[in-house]
Image (tube, rainbow, N blue to C red):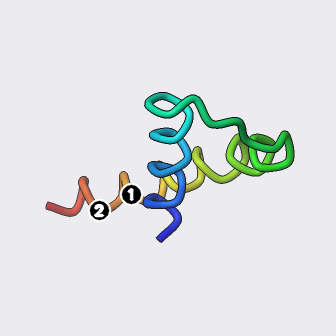
Amino acid sequence: MKFDRYRKLRNGINYYGENIEIETVKEAVINIPQLVKELEKYSKEQ
């Protein structure tokens, strides 16, 4: 669900020119690297 949320935010910005709140950006800067690390462990298991 987290990954999908950030995908939708990115698409909104890139394709529709939507603005997002600075607090959302601050949250994303913290959460996205953590999410990437979490997803990487699944790619290493296979």
Residue 29 percent coordinates (x, y): 71, 41
Which image quarter is the C terminus in?
Answer: bottom left
Question: At label 2, which amino acid type do we have?
Answer: Tyr
Label 1 and label 2: CA atoms lie apart by 5 Å
Front-most of residues 40 and 32:
32
Front-most of residues 44 and 33:
33
Residue 32 percent coordinates (x, y): 58, 48
Q: Residue furthest left?
A: 46
Front-most of residues 20 and 37:
20
Residue 18 percent coordinates (x, y): 62, 36
Q: Residue at x 59, y 53 (%)?
A: 34
Residue 28 percent coordinates (x, y): 68, 47
Query: Which circle marks residue 39 in the picture?
Result: 1
Front-most of residues 2 and 43:
2
Is disc 1 in contact with disc 2, using a CB cutoff of under 8 Å?
yes
For label 1, the SS is helix
Q: How many marks?
A: 2
Q: Which residue is mark 2?
A: 42
Q: Residue at x 55, y 47 (%)?
A: 9
Check disc 1: other Cα within 10 Å, few if <14, some if 14-19, many if 20+: few
Query: Which circle marks residue 21 in the picture?
Result: none
Q: Residue at x 75, y 41 (%)?
A: 25
- Residue 2 position (above or below residue 19): below
- Taking the image as shown, residue 45 lies to the left or right of residue 19, namely left
Question: At label 1, which amino acid type do we have?
Answer: Leu
Check disc 2: other Cα within 10 Å, few if <14, some if 14-19, many if 20+: few
- Residue 3 position (above or below residue 7): below
